[in-house]
Image (cartoon, grey):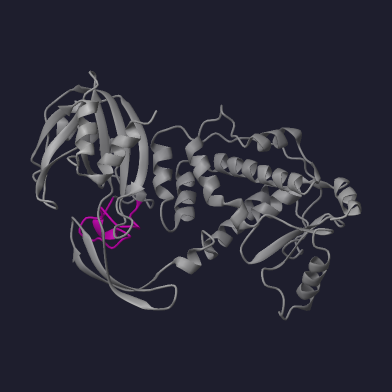
């Protein structure tokens, strides 16, 4: 690029709100550009050439001729990475039920929809939108600086965006007020990519509705459409209160069909790395029919369906209404209602007490992870409980026969190294619990 172009770029001052609006509206079907002569956003279809729209073709030709002199490509959805922003927001929340539930909600297909439902249910939508806006503003600043452009906007907002942080004193559910410099109005008849400004609360609300509609119509990551399998048919071989075992046929990305593919649904479950006041770890010994051996492992158990929790329509839980089709119990399935499930931390506390008779007031959520992403759709919620105290006796289910044992840290390390601690997720739970 010649010196004349460099000098011209140094004189450009971009309204940050203009770039932020473009980032808000980014989608896979349109590529957006900043026209530094008109100081507006223009957009063309991702593949405009050879189309029937003469106006779009003319604009595409102009962009090609003025590439990096007049027109500058704006961040795409891939560059923005909304899923990562969503994860960062969840991690910024205090540990507890809200963070735990949202973290589980964003795993798997349909993550954006479940996340949106979750923030609405917990009353933290404004917190989320404020956090998202700050991240978008940070991306806008970085984009301007990468092209050597100056930028203008509210100083407080710019400072917050550069730090990329949320108001540390705000609690989930509190509205985080933002002061925005308003310049101009939106042309309601402008085609996609016309100059846009954040000028009213109504416009921002409408824009968010449009953004959600876009998200529902496009893949959540750039490569899903190239890698995802298409489910052609499914037969439920066994479906009862314990498991939904399925035989399916899938079409691969190359068009070939594979069958049978076996998979299953079971309840989500918790694993607890529990230590007492002396620093010894509570384990259980029980027979595992899969390997036909008595194993040593940490307390664990399934997350139960709370039958006294009403559904979103106010009616009490009814197993037959389970979205996954598990008519017998509704306790498992990829589409199961989060509202009808026991909270994972409460499940962990219950399982520890039932299996060992111990309780704790010091809990840490370590990780939520798929149990077996290849063939199962359930998740393991891993917790650490410290300074556990004996408060009662065991209260085991009719299928549970187990003994409680205490081990030192060195003894558990030795069992793991010798292959005598034989539950893979439990070994991972131990490693996570030892990280400081």
Q: Is 429 on the left or on the right of 209, as rendered? A: left
Q: Does the image show residue 77? A: yes
Residue 134: quarter of image: top right
Would you say the magenta stretch is mainly helix, strand or loop? loop
Residue 49: quarter of image: bottom right
Above or below: residue 414 compared with residue 216: above
- Magenta stretch? 317-337
Above or below: residue 124 compared with residue 328: above
Above or below: residue 345 compared with residue 36: above
Q: Is 323 on the left or on the right of 45, as rendered? A: left
Above or below: residue 368 compared with residue 357: below
Q: Position of residue 196 (x, y in %)?
A: 75, 54
Q: Residue at x 44, y 50 (%)?
A: 106
- Extreme residue toward the right, this view: 4
Q: Is 295 on the left or on the right of 43, as rendered? A: left
* Quadrant occupied by the N terminus: bottom right
Query: Which residue is at the front of the view, 273 or 407?
Result: 407
* Quadrant occupied by the C terminus: top left
- Extreme residue toward the top, this view: 278
Q: Position of residue 413 (x, y in %)?
A: 24, 32
Indicate whether residue 329 is drawn in magenta: yes
Q: Residue at x 61, y 57 (%)?
A: 77
């Amino acid at each position: 690029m010649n010196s004349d172009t460099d000098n011209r770029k140094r004189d450009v001052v971009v309204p940050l709100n203009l770039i932020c609006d473009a980032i808000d509206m980014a989608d896979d079907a349109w590529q957006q550009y900043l026209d530094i002569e008109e100081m507006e956003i223009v957009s063309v279809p991702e593949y405009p050439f050879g189309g029937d729209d003469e106006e779009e073709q003319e604009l595409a030709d102009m962009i090609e001729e003025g590439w990096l002199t007049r027109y500058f490509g704006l961040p795409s959805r891939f560059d923005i990475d909304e899923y990562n922003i969503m994860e960062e927001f969840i991690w910024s929340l205090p540990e507890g039920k809200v963070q735990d539930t949202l973290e589980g909600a964003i795993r798997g297909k349909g993550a954006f929809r479940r996340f949106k439902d979750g923030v609405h249910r917990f009353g933290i939508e404004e917190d989320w939108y404020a956090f998202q806006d700050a991240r978008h503003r940070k991306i806008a600043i970085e984009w301007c600086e990468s092209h050597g452009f100056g930028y203008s906007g509210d100083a407080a907002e710019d400072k917050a965006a550069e730090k990329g942080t949320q108001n540390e004193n705000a609690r989930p559910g509190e509205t985080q007020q933002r002061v925005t410099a308003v310049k101009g109005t939106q042309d309601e008849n402008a085609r996609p990519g016309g100059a846009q400004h954040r000028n009213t609360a109504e416009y921002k609300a409408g824009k968010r509705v449009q953004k959600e509609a876009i998200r529902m119509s496009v893949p959540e990551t750039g490569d899903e459409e190239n890698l995802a399998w298409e489910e052609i048919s499914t037969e439920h071989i066994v479906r009862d209160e314990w498991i939904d075992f399925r035989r399916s046929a899938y079409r691969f990305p190359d068009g070939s069909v594979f069958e049978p593919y076996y998979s299953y649904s079971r309840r989500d479950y918790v694993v607890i790395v529990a230590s007492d006041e002396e620093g010894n770890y509570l384990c259980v010994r029980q027979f595992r029919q899969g390997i036909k051996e008595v194993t040593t492992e940490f307390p664990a158990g399934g997350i139960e369906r709370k039958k006294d929790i009403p559904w979103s329509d106010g009616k009490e839980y009814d197993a037959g209404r389970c979205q996954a089709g598990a008519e017998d119990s509704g306790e498992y399935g990829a589409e199961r209602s989060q509202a009808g499930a026991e909270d994972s931390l409460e499940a962990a506390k219950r399982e520890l007490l039932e299996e060992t008779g111990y309780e704790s007031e010091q809990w840490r959520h370590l990780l939520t992870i798929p149990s077996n992403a290849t063939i199962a759709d359930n998740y393991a919620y891993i917790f650490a409980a410290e300074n556990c105290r004996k408060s009662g006796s065991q209260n085991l289910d009719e299928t549970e026969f187990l003994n409680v044992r205490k081990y030192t840290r060195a003894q558990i390390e030795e069992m793991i190294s010798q292959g005598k601690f034989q539950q893979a997720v439990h070994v991972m739970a131990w490693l996570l619990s030892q990280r400081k």
